[in-house]
Amino acid sequence: MAVAAPDTIAALASAAGQAGVAVIRLSGPDVPAIVTALTGRLPAPRHAALAGFLDEHGQAIDRGLVLYFPAPASFTGEHVAELHGHGSPVLVDLLLARLVALGARLAGPGEFSQRAFLNDKLSLDQAEAIADAIAATSAVTARAAVRSLEGVFARDVDALVAELTALRVYTEAAIDFPDEEDVDFLGDGQILGRLDAIAARLADLRAAAGQGAGFRDGLRVVILGAPNVGKSSLLNRLSRRDSAIVTAIAGTTRDVLTEQLSIDGLPLTLVDTAGLRETDDPVEAEGVRRARAEIAGADRVLLVIDDTAGVTANDAALLTELAPAAGVTLIANKIDLSTNAPGACAIDGHTAVRVSAKSGAGFDALAAHLKALAGVDDQAEPVFVARRRHLAALDEAGVCLTTARQRLTVDAAGDLVAEELRLAQNALGAITGRVTSDDLLGEIFSSFCIGK
């Protein structure tokens, strides 16, 4: 799928702002000419050379190292150069302006990685893993992203695609030679056995991807409940700092408070909200409106109740209201007063965890519950990182295999089996980019930082 780029791009590849060193990257057909004009010579490939970066009058803009990587042995598959200069924003701007004057243009978000993908240097999931490695919020997700970048996920997907291809060939042969003497290709068990083996491997890959996606995406959790049941105390205990004001006065929390934290490597966004109640206070009423709006984007709602009172009529009404919108876990707070045992339990048929935000009792069980909701195995680290689109593609492939099994065992329709296998193959191909659309590429790479 190698594509020759018509132009040369340039961008700051290191972090913006003052630093000891700034790295500017170029990629495209004009790199040799631009580097020669900028420094006076083209250095030997893959050897760092000290050079002055010169303006149009031959005066030095800066002085630093130049590295040149001729096509196709480069990150993007094109001619690539890196300029390592001093980390002054002023010098960086002057140098980028000089590169533009010499014929480059400023790169858009993710454009270097996109060119690497288009030139078969990376699969699509590997390109995404670059962004995931940069954005990693824990050592666990960073290691998983690096393994994805090394091709662990892509190799597993490609192996499944190869097995599907081989099974399609066998199935289509059965369709082409239905009258072969003494051979019932569709009914001899070969296709069914191989189909079940592929489905089992796909299920294992889906489980591993779910683990990786859980660590990458984490959970967005909204804390709801009646006033003064301990929502803000729960937030403070989980975030290990006094993020929210806690008083005995109902209605203290007037706005939505958001905290980013990590539980054993699992990213967690906690949203504390105003107590849901009818109020004539316009400020508190706006807080209640925002709390209800947060529910729509939540992965889980923690409905905090007072364990000394149990599920009140107001709590029951909230549970009824929340049921269609999001999964709900009851957090029975104040067990230091109720004397109930901490930990996971069921209350009135609802999933619940009993805790004390005051003493911290039960919070280990709450952490384990949140990790389980994210699909995170407490005993294992993700083998690779995955995104929700990857999970959707794996699920789609699984549905196709289930349908193919039905077409084989119930309908004995070989042509329909082959079609479902093709659809499963296409779904898996969308993960690595073997089958994709320009719209999807634009959506993925636009989320990258500039310079990658």
Image (cartoon, rainbow, N blue to C red):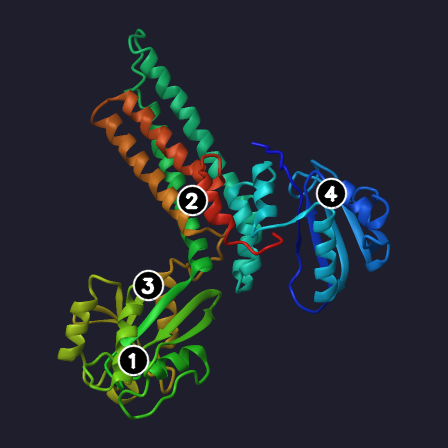
**Label placed on residue 205:** 2
For label 1, the crowd category at 10 Å Cα-Cα, with few meaning under 14, some 14 to 19 and many 20 or more, is: many
Q: How far, Cα to Cα, is label 3 from label 1?
A: 16 Å
Q: How far, Cα to Cα, is label 1 from label 4?
A: 57 Å
Please tell me whether mark 2 sits on a helix, a strand or a loop.
Answer: helix
Q: Outermost residue, bottom direction?
A: 248
**Label placed on residue 297:** 3
> Where is the N terminus found, in terms of image quarters?
top right
Of badges 4 and 3, nearer the viewer stands 4
Disc 1 target residue: 274
Residue 425 higher or lower than 69, as above or below: above
For label 2, the crowd category at 10 Å Cα-Cα, with few meaning under 14, some 14 to 19 and many 20 or more, is: some
Residue 334 higher or lower than 21, as above or below: below
> Does the residue at mark 4 contact the one at mark 2 (Cβ under 8 Å)?
no
Q: How far, Cα to Cα, is label 4 from label 3?
A: 45 Å
Q: How far, Cα to Cα, is label 2 from label 1?
A: 41 Å
Residue 353 visible here: no
Amino acid marked by disc 1 = Ala
Q: Earlier in the sequence, mark 4 or mark 3?
A: 4
Amino acid marked by disc 2 = Leu
Residue 4: percent from the left, percent from the top?
62, 34
Q: Is residue 14 left or right of residue 84?
A: left
Residue 182: percent from the left, percent from the top?
30, 9
Q: Earlier in the sequence, mark 2 or mark 1?
A: 2
Disc 4 target residue: 31
Residue 116: percent from the left, percent from the top?
60, 42
Hey, which quadrant is residue 244 in on the image?
bottom left
Q: Earlier in the sequence, mark 3 or mark 2?
A: 2
Of badges 4 and 2, nearer the viewer stands 4
Q: How far, Cα to Cα, is label 4 from label 2?
A: 41 Å
Amino acid marked by disc 3 = Gly
